[in-house]
Amino acid sequence: MKLFFDPRQLDHAPALELHNGGYVPYAEHPGRVKNMLARLTETEAPTDRGETPIARIHGPAYLAFLKSAHRQWVDAGRAGDATGYVWPIVGRRPLHLQRIDAQFGQYSFDAASPVAAQTWDGAYWAAQTALAATDAVLNGAPAAFALCRPPGHHAGADYLGGYCYLNNVAIAAQAAIDAGKARVAILDVDYHHGNGTQDIFYDRGDVLFVSIHADPVTDYPFFWGHADECGDGAGEGANLNIPLPRGTGMADYQVALKTALYSIAAFAPEVLLVSFGADTYEGDPISQFKLKTEDFTEIAAQISAADLPTVIVMEGGYATEALGDNVASFLSGF
Ligand code: Q9C
Ligand code: ZN
C-alpha cells in the first residue's frame, strides 16, 4: 500500500491541554508519529496542492484565524500556546469580535486544542498528506494511507477542537467529488464521534458519513454523535451514527461494523474514505473500548471486503507505545 507522510507535520507541538480540570502533557504529541513511522517502510511526501482544496471545506475567516491566532496571542502579550477560555452559549447572537480570546470563542468548541507557533504549518501538511493519498487512489491504487497529524475529524468548516484544526478527511472527500466522483462515503472508526465531518456534510446527499464511536452521553464530544442525527435536507439519510457503550470489545464492535458496511454498500459510493483512530485500543489512556491489536486486522479485512477504492486517514490513538503495532495491524488487513 502507498503510505504518505510529511515531516513538517511534526512542527505542530502544543505543550499542554486542559484535562479533567488540570493541565497535563498534550496527548496528541509528535512522538505518536515516530512510533508509527518505525513500523511503516517507505513513506512518500505529498506534493503541495496549495490552499484551494482546503478552502473548499474551510471558510476564509476561519482560515485567517487559524493562520494568525498564535501571532495575535503573542501580540496580546501572552506566552506559550494560544488557547480559548470563553465560549458563546447556544442561541447567543453571533458577534464578530477582534480580540483573540473572543475569536477562540467563535472558532473553537473546546479547551483541548491550543494553537501553537507551528500549528498552521502542521495542519496544512496533514491536509496535503490526505490529498496525496486521495490522488493515489483516484489514479488507480486500491488503497492508500495518509499518516495525518494533527488529526482532523473534530474540526468543522469554521471551528477547531479535539486536537483537530483542518478536517483532513473532509478535504480529501471533497477533492474526490471535485475530481468527478458522484458519491463518496466516509467511515469513521475513531473512538470519538467525528463531529466536524458530520457537520460539514450534514445537509449533503453526495457524501455519506457513517461513524462508530463511544456513546456521546458519556464521552467527548457530547453534543454530537447521537443515534437520531440522520442528516438534513438533501443529506437526510446520509448520516449514520452508531454509538456504543464504554467497555465495548470486538464481538459487539463487529456487529456495529456490519451495520455500517451494509449502509455503505447500499449507498454505492465510488470511493471510501476511512477516518482511522487507534484510540479504540484497550490500552488507550483517554478511551474506554477494549479492542486488541489483532482486532484491527480483522476490522480492516471486513472494510476491505467492501471492495471499494479506499483512502485511509489517520485520526486519534494515544497509547503511543502500541500505536505503530496497531496501525500496522490495521493496514495489514487491506
Ligand atoms: N477527559 C481525537 O481522537 N479530550 N481527538 C478528551 C477526556 C479530547 C480526541 C478529554 C479528546 C479528543 C482525534
Ligand atoms: Zn479519537
Image (tube, grey):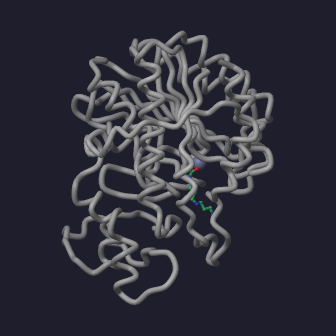
Nearer to us in this view, 103 or 253: 103
Residue 43 locus on image (x, y percent): 61, 33
Which residue is farthest bottom?
Answer: 77
Give residue 245's quadrant in the image: top right
Q: Which residue is painted at 56% across and 68% down in the image?
A: 14
Note whether 251 is above or below 37 in the view shown.
above
Note whether 216 is above or below 203 in the view shown.
below
Answer yes or no: is residue 141 visible.
Answer: yes
Residue 24 locus on image (x, y percent): 67, 73
Report the quarter where the C terminus lies: top right
Note whether 82 is above or below 158 in the view shown.
below
Q: Is residue 233 left or right of residue 112?
A: left
Q: Which residue is painted at 48% across and 44% down in the image?
A: 194
How many numbered markers are drawn?
0
Q: Is residue 253 left or right of residue 121?
A: right
Nearer to us in this view, 226 or 104: 104
Give residue 56's quadrant in the image: top left
Give residue 103's quadrant in the image: bottom left
Residue 254 locus on image (x, y percent): 68, 24
Answer yes or no: is residue 242 visible.
Answer: no
Q: Is residue 171 left or right of residue 97?
A: right
Q: Which residue is painted at 48% across and 54% down in the image?
A: 122
Note whether 131 is above or below 67 in the view shown.
above
Residue 108 locus on image (x, y percent): 38, 64
Report the quarter where the N terminus lies: top right
Nearer to us in this view, 161 or 57: 57
